[in-house]
Image (cartoon, rainbow, N blue to C red):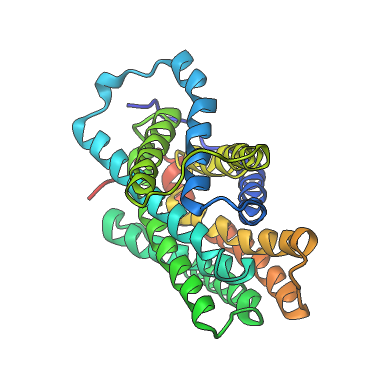
Amino acid sequence: MNATRAPLPKWALTLLLLAGIAAISFSSIFIRWSSAPSSILAMYRLVLTVLLMLPFLLRQRPDLRTVTLRDWLMMGASGVFLMLHFLLWMESLRYTSVASSTILLSLEPMFVLAGAYWLFRERTTARAVLGMSAAIAGAGLIGWGDVGISARALQGDLLSFLGTAAVAVHMLIGQSLARRIPTLLYSITVFSVAAAAFFLYNLLTSTPMTGYGARDWGIFLLLAVVPTVFGHVLFNWLLQYVNAATVSMSVLGEPVGATLLAYLLLGEKLNPMQAAAGLIIIWGVWFFLRHNRVHYEQRESGTPSTAA
């Protein structure tokens, strides 16, 4: 069991969430730069992440005797859902634009809030819900001018939607474990399970796992360091201080960052409506974090999360 941690100052929490948003915004750009299959990109991304993190885990040497069989099974399930998220969302970028794909990720808070109420009986304030609604509406406007009507684009939208549902389950499992499982142990276990699942997937689908050039390996490494370590791992760590809904709301900033990066680096167009929608998302995320007071009061008083 982890010792009770002092709450983070809100300014520090805000900076860390912004850093995580910036990191994950590069994910779609790196994926577009590579010609490797999505399942290969994700597998090596996870493998390299585990290799980068393993020395820190070995130095800490967490007490594995405190981890129950149920905890291991839950971490395994979290890894499977993370694998499904990466597979479905990364594949969606092959069919539709960055804006159209990342926009559907904005539905994640809706899944997470519903799941958190069902599993943890978590509630939030009416003003926080207003902020969430504004951010989701703004995210919808970003993709409005770019959502295609072709069968190929619709297939990409469906893949992104299913990937969003999968990552919501991953986040909820992480929240239930974050109070008692060390962050490094949780992250490495989940990433290892997801990487193993990708290995089996590539094996069963006869996807080549060798023969990739230096450019692809460079992108594999960038995916491991930037959006995974400074994105997903950072968010996993923050689950010790905030709930999954707060992290998910912060991730709503990704469509803004990804759309701007796609405009600068990929030449995808950014129209005035999308730019205005980005401002709405930023306001919505800020408003949610400012008024999600019920959660902050519970964590600051030392009330632990309760599993179903």
Query: Is 208 drawn above or below residue 84 in the view shown?
Result: above
Name the quadrant containing residue 294. bottom left
- Residue 174 in the image, given as x and y percentages of width and height: 38, 44
Query: Is 202 drawn above or below residue 140 in the view shown?
Result: above
Position of the N terminus by quadrant:
top left
Front position in the image: 72 or 111: 72
Name the quadrant containing residue 288. bottom right
Front position in the image: 72 or 176: 72
The answer to whether any part of residue 66 appears in the image is yes
Front position in the image: 176 or 162: 162
Name the residue at 50% across, 71% down: 156
Front position in the image: 259 or 266: 266
Query: Is 308 drawn above or below residue 118 in the view shown?
Result: above
Side of 231 where 75 appears, left or right: left
The answer to whether any part of residue 305 appears in the image is no
- Residue 31 in the image, given as x and y percentages of width and height: 61, 53
Side of 112 where 147 appears, left or right: right
- Residue 98 in the image, given as x and y percentages of width and height: 63, 66
Tally of numbered tags: 0
Name the residue at 57% across, 62% down: 252
- Residue 59 in the image, given as x and y percentages of width and height: 48, 14
Name the quadrant containing residue 289. bottom right
Name the residue at 80% across, 61% down: 264
Residue sitting at the far bottom? 149
Name the residue at 63% across, 60% down: 253
